[in-house]
Amino acid sequence: MADPIIKIRNLHKWYSGVHALKGVSLDIQPNEALGLVGDNGAGKSTLINILSGIQQADEGEITIDGEKVNFRNPRDAMDRGIETIYQYNSMVPTMSIARNMFIGREPLKASFMGVGIMDRKRMAEESVQAIADVDLHLRSPDALVGELSGGQRQGVAIARAMHFKSKVMILDEPTNHLAVKETQKVIGFVQSLKELGITAIFISHNIHHVFECCDRIVAMARGEVVLDRRTEETNMEEIHSAL
Amino acid sequence: MRRLLKIYMEKPELAGIVFLLLLAAVFQFQTDGAFLNAYNMQGILGILPEMALVAIGVTLLMICGEFDLSVGSVFALTPMVMAVLIQDGWPFLPAIMAGMATALLIGFVNGFLTIRFQIPSFITTLGMLFVARSITVVISGGFPPVLPRDALPRGMFTSFVGPNDLFRMSFVWFVLVAVVVSLLLSRTNFGNWVRATGGFLPAAQAMGIPTARVKTACFMLCSLLAGFAGTIQVMRLGAPLPSIGEGLELQAVAAAVIGGTALTGGIGTILGGIIGATLIRVIDNGLVLSQVDANWFKLAIGSLTIFAVILNSWLRKKAKAMKVET
Ligand SMILES: Nc1ncnc2c1ncn2[C@@H]1O[C@H](COP(=O)(O)OP(=O)(O)OP(=O)(O)O)[C@@H](O)[C@H]1O
Ligand SMILES: [Mg+2]
């Protein structure tokens, strides 16, 4: 087996009294699609929030490509190629697709102390290209994200992550509140990541979806990993009983 | 419906422009042409920049998702600091700089308290409204400082310019600021961050935007513009009264809202805020010219604001429903 792209060792997190992560260790292989399942409050979001720099661990170690990392904010994680997609949190509905694609990473024509004129032509062209690359068909990069369906929004978020050459894509319940057809679209996106050589961590409450698009399934309960199997070596019953 | 919503979300100031034109036509008719004559226009355009500059800052801050109720007090405090220092023998330039620095400091404190303690800026800046007003009165010593006639370079700020002396210099400053802030909001990465921060804070944070710094910058810019506007008014009037700008904070919020800025942040344009401010000034002036009892002014502004907010929130609900159904 290749060297893991992400190595998590003995991660702990406390929230004023709640021990949300109790020594989680996990290896994630390059180009695998990992499904993360578990009941409400199992610690899934806490784990990936730490991986994406939104929160910091109280104890433990994360290495990426063999190098120890310490993300202080989401930008640090993004700079290391880790991009996170949430149901609600990754797009601003009142802004256009092109602007959303480049939030925080706007191409600039000229700048002074970090503030500069955006290259709007490039933003429009590159977002059209990025969206086409994920086989999403949208009329215009100037459409507001608020006008898109939930599935289309997730498509744009995924297009954004790919445009910025992310190596690891974390999807935290990306199919929540989506209609069946939209959900299938998102699962299709996750499946296509594999062909593109992108590692995916897919969190879902729907075990069927996880079986559909993941190579490996990790189950968490009460802040611990309670099961870790290749998809073909396990089944629904085993996962249900582990939870 | 979809088209209407799209227009509203992209050009929220459009309704304001239409209403402004309508109103101008009505007043022109009502006053037998006195409204649009050169003399009256000179009056409106001479005062407008002071309020519009405040509205620009407040609009920017509201787009960023925060409020500033202290602008009226900063409007008075900034020139008061300047005047007191000039009276103490300071030259004009360092004195005005000290005034502006005071405004920036107040903006910074507003932002810092709001973000650090996670309290609504409505409350922080309400407190600052009283604090800054109080400081203004105290440092004035109860009497407005008397400034020597030649202490202020009025030529740079308030003297008449343009064809038929239609404008004051303040109008030039206002146009300059309006263009710069509009470009800042629409063309720069900073503007993108402001909209993202106000539009949907969790997304902005998840994308690594330094939202605390973006908000603080907007608070400071808003405060600075209010201070600058107050300084211009004092130059026009010739004396720094400690009571100027009272009630201006609410008029500025009204201007932003009438111009299509959403109370919830993320939606709005600088042009909208300016249109709103212009509407308020035009209503004020038009009512006086039409010889209507001046006390109707607040009723008119109030109704217009409520109407604008209702329209805004109705459209927003529609937009939300639209998102769910797709
Ligand atoms: N910001 C927070 N403050 C306090 N406690 C928190 C916070 N975030 C999470 N917790 C607690 O930590 C534990 C793990 O929560 P987490 O959100 O990671 O679970 P999850 O597996 O993502 O659940 P879900 O499936 O509901 O999303 C829970 O007990 C939760 O109440
Ligand atoms: Mg969760």
Image (spheres, coloured by chain):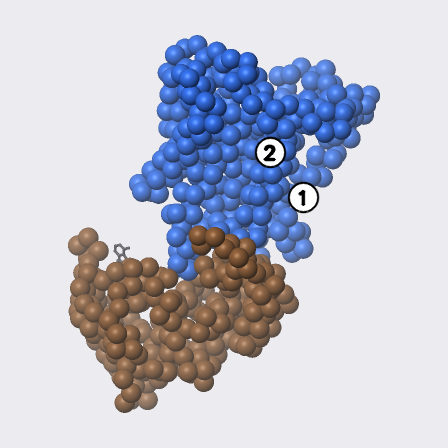
Chain colours: A brown, B blue
Q: Looking at the image, which is closer to me, A192 or A165?
A: A165
Cα gap from disc 2 to disc 1, whole angstroms: 24 Å
Callout 1 amino acid: Leu
Q: Residue at x 29, y 87 (%)?
A: A2
Q: Quadrant of residue B129?
A: top left
Does the image show residue B307?
A: no
Callout 2 amino acid: Trp
Q: Residue at x 52, y 18 (%)?
A: B151
Say whether mark 2 is within 8 Å of ligand 1.
no
**Residue B132, percent from left and from top:** 40, 24
Q: Residue at x 37, y 74 (%)?
A: A168
Does the image show residue B240?
A: yes
Work out whether B88 lies above or below B251. above
**Residue B28, percent from left and from top:** 78, 26
The chain letter for the residue carrying disc 2 is B
For label 2, the residue is: B173
| Earlier sequence position, callout 2 versus callout 1 | 1
Q: Looking at the image, which is closer to me, A22 or A128?
A: A128
The chain letter for the residue carrying disc 1 is B
Q: Looking at the image, which is closer to me, B28 or A78?
A: A78
Q: Secondary structure at mark 2?
A: helix
Circle 1 crowding by C-alpha within 10 Å: few under 14, some 14–19, many from 20: some
Work out whether B107 lies above or below A34. above
Going by the image, does A225 lie left or right of A29? Answer: left
Going by the image, does A52 lie left or right of B32? Answer: left
- Foreground: disc 2 or disc 1: 2
For label 1, the residue is: B14
Q: Which mark is residue A16?
A: none
Q: Residue at x 75, y 34 (%)?
A: B22
Q: Looking at the image, which is closer to me, B42 or A81?
A: B42
